[in-house]
Image: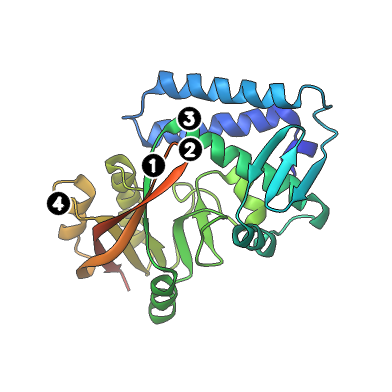
Amino acid sequence: MWILEQFGPKKFQWGEDEALERCLQRTPSINRKEVLERAKTFRKEWKNACKKKDPLDIKVTNIGNTLTFGNSSHYVNRSILKKLHDSYKGEPSKFPHAAWALTHLYEMFLRVTGDGMQLSVPNKKYLKWAQKQNISLECFASPFNHNLPRFCSALPIVDAPFGSLGSFFDIDLKENAICNPPYTEEVLSAAFDRIEHALNNHPLLIIFVTPCWDDADAIIRAKACPYKIKEKVRRDFETNSIANGISIVHPCDSYVFTFTSK
């Protein structure tokens, strides 16, 4: 594909804009004006860092855990960098470019949209579910944290070379899946809309993991869903919230719903 070299800075800017627009559409409670202003500031920082470089003459170095483009660097944990390398499906020589673009866009996305919260289901639990229920798809993940080889993610323009199938909201769900959305009511509700549509149209099994928010629209509908075969409360899961770039772990009671249309 690869963005920074082949698509150029205008297309890369389009990738940022697309990511922001998706976030704003799915989470209307976010202050649009503030988000766009932060995005403008972030983009200006990036341009200033690289202004002495020809944007198409990209030199990327991997020094330890750091990916550098011009004067702009991103730290990546060694184990995560290995995960990215192992899942990368593009031209080998373009891996540093793709990894830099990926980390840059995710950092921008987190910075401009503020805090986020996502349930952390233990990896062993994911793999157990996948094996026991013949699950092949993870509906909400990223190249940094996916547990299954087949996964959907928020930022397809940079995620695709690392195996992402695109946004969960854009695919036609036809396979057994684990759906563990970010914890906002808007996203939970939109995700359940997609689950209902898939169950109505295809024979499959879906595990839906949510917070124990009994008055939330998605949870009310999940409890009443005719495809539900199991509902369980788990007290051993955690959420990871991002605040000012710091990951904070919280214990969290969660519902695990199992639906099947088989």
Q: SS of the residue at dot 4?
A: loop
Residue 249 is situated, as x and y percent measured from the top left of the image, at 36, 53
Residue 201 seen anywhere in this rendered image of the structure = yes
Q: SS of the residue at dot 3?
A: helix
Q: Quadrant of the C terminus?
A: bottom left
* Disc sitting over residue 214 in the figure: 4
> 191 or 41, which is in the foreground?
41
* Disc sitting over residue 112 in the figure: 3
Residue 125 is situated, as x and y percent measured from the top left of the image, at 38, 73
Q: Earlier in the sequence, mark 1 or mark 4?
A: 1
Instruction: Say if mark 1 contacts mark 2, CB within 8 Å.
Output: yes
Residue at image position (27%, 58%) is 251
Label 2 to label 3: alpha-carbon separation: 6 Å
Residue 100 is situated, as x and y percent measured from the top left of the image, at 69, 44
- Residue type marked 2: Leu
Q: Quadrant of residue 97?
A: top right
Residue 1 seen anywhere in this rendered image of the structure = no
Q: Earlier in the sequence, mark 3 or mark 4?
A: 3
- Residue type marked 1: Gly
Residue at image position (51%, 50%) is 153
- Residue type marked 3: Val
Instruction: Say if mark 2 contacts mark 3, CB within 8 Å.
Output: yes
Label 1 to label 4: alpha-carbon separation: 20 Å
Would you call the spot at circle 1 few (<14 residues within 10 Å), some (14-19), or many (20 or more)?
A: some
Relative placement, left or right, of 186 versus 173 is left
